[in-house]
Image (cartoon, helix red, strand yellow):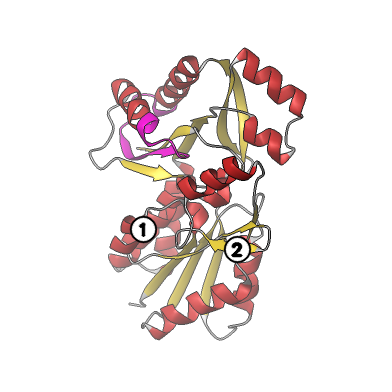
Amino acid sequence: MPRIAIITDTDSSLPAELAARHGIQQVPITINFGAESYETGRDIDDVRTFERIDREGKLPTTAAPAPGRFVEAFQEAFHAGADTVLCFCVSAEVSRTYDSAKAAAAELPDRDIVVVDTRSLSMGFGFMVVAAAEAAQAGLSKAQVLARAEDVGRRTHLYAALSTLKYLAMSGRVGHLAAGMAGLLSIKPILTVRGGKLDMLERVRTRGKAWARVVELAVQTAAGRPIERAAILHVNAQEEARDFAAQVGAGLALPPDLFYVELTPGLSVHAGAGLVGVTLVVGQ
């Protein structure tokens, strides 16, 4: 049976220990503060990112990994004995990471490499990656591994609540006046993954109502079915994430291996500190 290696990028939000447990290699998204560049998961995280943003009053830019970084990751996997590489990338709607990985695969035409545009982000595809790694470790074929990942992707749902529009205003995604009014009125947008992007689903007043609405959406989505996997997402908000998890757990029977996950800088700079959310893989 061919040995299959699983590779992804750090926009999957996979905690390092979870990735290591399943032998998943993550290619880092780059964060640029002016001329200074940092690699997500290696020399920068959400805490350090927002410390610097708040100190300097401006957002960094993000960049997809260069094709060469994917070539290195692919070659490392083959040198370690893999016959096949499956590379799962953040949605091409939000990043050029997929294009970069495809370009890298084209540089190794004699190798068996499949690059997948997951059309999702954060643990919305992180759980796909984990499912693929588990299937590969169990000795399933390439087609079976891909089918397992796609099945999990179809059953994965993400809902989150923004804490503030301050950072969206800094990015120019909303006008400063609109952001100021939203702050005054305590508007908290509810987000979900739609069309391959993190999209606004609703607007709710106050954090308490926003959290309650996210839980309500999660309960409605589960519709009484079991939750196979779950992760609590946050951006530089560990204490809030614990409080939010308790609220989610009061409405849903969450699995014992609940993960607390940083969104990671490649995504969090577009959402802002204080975001909390939940990703669920709903049973059949």
Asked where in the image residue 173 lies, by quadrant, the reply is top right
Horizontal side of 78 relative to 225 (left or right) equals right
Q: Quadrant of the C terminus?
A: top left
Horizontal side of 48 relative to 35 (left or right) equals left
The residue under the point 40% across, 49% down is: 127
Front residue (pair 111, 97): 97
Disc number at residue 37?
2
Q: Where is residue 117 drawn, in percent x and y?
A: 58, 57
Can residue 120 be seen here? The reply is no
Q: Where is residue 229 drawn, in percent x and y?
A: 33, 42
Q: Amino acid at mark 1?
A: Ala
The residue under the point 70% across, 33% down is: 169
Horizontal side of 131 relative to 189 (left or right) equals left
Distance, label 2 to label 1, CA atoms, is 21 Å
Q: Residues within 10 Å of mark 2 (few under 14, many from 20)?
A: some
> Which residue range is magenta in the image?
221-241
**Vertical placement of residue 215 versus 135, above or below:** above
**Vertical placement of residue 210 versus 135, above or below:** above
Nearer the observer: mark 2 or 1; the answer is: 2
Residue 233 on the magenta span: yes
Front residue (pair 107, 164): 164
Q: Quadrant of the N terminus?
A: bottom left
Can residue 115 be seen here? The reply is yes
Residue 128 on the magenta span: no
Q: Residue furthest left?
A: 256
Mark 1, residue position: 16
**Vertical placement of residue 254 versus 92, above or below:** above
Are circles 2 and 1 on residues that touch, CB within 8 Å? no
Disc number at residue 141?
none
Horizontal side of 162 relative to 41 (left or right) equals right
Q: Amino acid at mark 2?
A: Ser
